[in-house]
Image (cartoon, rainbow, N blue to C red):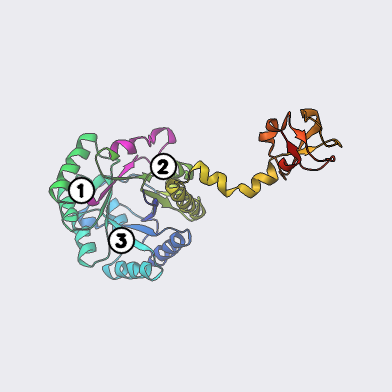
Amino acid sequence: MSLTEIIVEIGNTHEGSLGVAKSFAFMAKKSGAKTVKFQMHLAEFEGVLDEPFRVKFSEQDRTRQDYWKRVNFSLENWINLAEYCKSIEIEFLCTPFSLEAAQVLHANRLIQRWKIGSGQAVEWPLIDYVSQSGLPLIISTGLVSVEEILLLRERLQLNGAWSRTTLLHCVSQYPAPIEHLDLHLMSELRKLGCRVGFSDHSGNPNVALYAISLGAEVIEVHMTPSIDYFGPDVSSSLLPNEISWLVEFAAVSDVLRKSTGTKIEHFNRVAELRTIFRKGVYWNSHLPKGTVISEAHLSFLKPVRGVDVINYESLLGKTTCVEVFPGEPVKLDQLSG
């Protein structure tokens, strides 16, 4: 199993500002993430004019359509943002919320792989297009039933895309209560024969840490620069320093998962420390040559300078062949019998 990838989801938190979007990409890069993700919303291809808000958070936008238009970038600015991400060496990822958005991203070679949200996971025209592109796919499953996941797998298999697909367990609540997350369901997805990960909306870094420990190959987390920031996803987001913890934890977990050392190897590595921390056997009396050794003649002290305490019983009943003095370590060449 490879290192868990942390995808930092910005979504539309940039509020339509290219400069703010770039600053988010830079924060993600500083946090140690290798991938930053945005969303492309083409209002005319996404919803009806009276499409309801999930959360009516903006007094600036009269309708959801107004919001999509305000936060979406021109093609020139999308290209600019993608080139900026490339310049700071972080992968630019962008979720298309329509077939037309996917066509824009693909035609302009803005992305190296697809991330599809759970609301579009069974939108077959879009799924057929992205799966036939030859690029890897990451698909969230929060709004998809078990039966629909099986249909999705069948569709991707027909398009030859299943082997390059990662399914993300997801709970589509914002924020998602911890008691509803059920991360064990990643193992159910894994039974389908694909890579598996988790898209988090809890706003709690401990959840993602646990998902990493369960073997998630991809973790997607929202990021906000402050808990007081504006936007509908802030309560579901992590701070940059929390994302840094995830990246570091993922790296440590990768090393731990790959560890194959044996107890013998560990024992041999600490040979010198054993002599310091374990006790050896010492004389506690002045004994003439020819004394038969009993436990009363011995002390057990650090460090080991002769006989280890584990072997002290093998000394009992032997006879000193030289004169010995208190405080000296017991040596085998001092004994006979």
Q: Earlier in the sequence, mark 2 or mark 1?
A: 1
Q: Disc 3 marks which residue? A: 72
Residue at disc 3, secondary structure: loop
Residue closest to the far left: 158
Say which of marks 3 and 2 sits in front. 2
Amino acid type at image mark 3: Asn
Q: Distance of mark 3 from mark 2, alpha carbons? A: 32 Å
Q: Is the residue 220 above or below the residue 294 in the image? A: below
Q: Are marks 2 and 1 in contact (CB under 8 Å)?
A: no
For the question of whether residue 146 can be seen, the reply is: yes
Kind of residue at badge 1: Trp
Query: Which residue is pictured at 34% across the width and 58% down the height?
Result: 38
Q: Which residue is mark 1?
A: 162
Tell me the distance, in whole angstroms, between the alpha carbons under discs 1 and 3: 30 Å
Q: Magenta part of the protein: which range?
A: 162-189
Q: Nearer the viewer, mark 1 or mark 3?
A: 1
Report the number of numbered marks.
3
Binning the other alpha carbons within 10 Å of mark 2 as few (below 14), some (14 to 19) or many (20 upward) gives many
Q: Earlier in the sequence, mark 1 or mark 3?
A: 3
Quarter of the picture holding the C terminus: top right
Confirm whether the magenta stretch covers residue 142: no
